[in-house]
Image: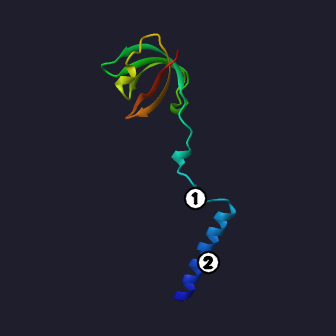
Amino acid sequence: MMKVHHILIAAILEAAAAQASAQGMSMPAKPAAASAPAMPLVDGEVRKLDPAAGLVVLQHGDIPNLAMPGTTMGFDVADKKMLNGLKVGDKVRFQAEMIKGKATVTELKTVK
């Protein structure tokens, strides 16, 4: 009886593997994160700055990775040094992510 049981289990596993193969299922060669597209740079304009607090208010276009429509709002910055030399009215391109529940600018470039 034990031998029949092992044969049955082997047959089930083989059938499952054959079905997965027939459906084109396989393990991905790369982790999903490695193939994820880069986050977009979003156009914006500096409206207010608080370098000491690490805050910037930007009027911006849609931020697709946050599913956020264009608006004017405040953001934390991942590094206060990003605000060095920045002034109200500057045109920028930036990336934002949700970090610890807050919309945070992770990359910021001025546009000439």
**SS label for mark 2:** helix
Q: Which image quadrant is residue 62 in?
A: top right
Of pointers 2 and 1, the one earlier in the residue sequence = 2
Residue occupied by mark 2? 11
Q: Residue at x 43, y 10 (%)?
A: 88
**SS label for mark 1:** loop
Q: Is the residue under label 1 in contact with that under label 2 (CB below 8 Å)? A: no
Q: Amino acid at mark 1?
A: Met
Residue occupied by mark 1? 27
Q: Amino acid at mark 2?
A: Ala
Badge 1 crowding class, 10 Å Cα cut-off, few under 14, some 14 to 19, many 20 or more, is few
Closer to us: 37 or 18:
37
15, above or below 78, in the image:
below
| Cα separation between marks 2 and 1 | 22 Å
84, above or below 15, in the image:
above
Q: Which mark is residue 60?
A: none
| Direction top: furthest residue | 89
Q: Which image quadrant is residue 53 in?
A: top left
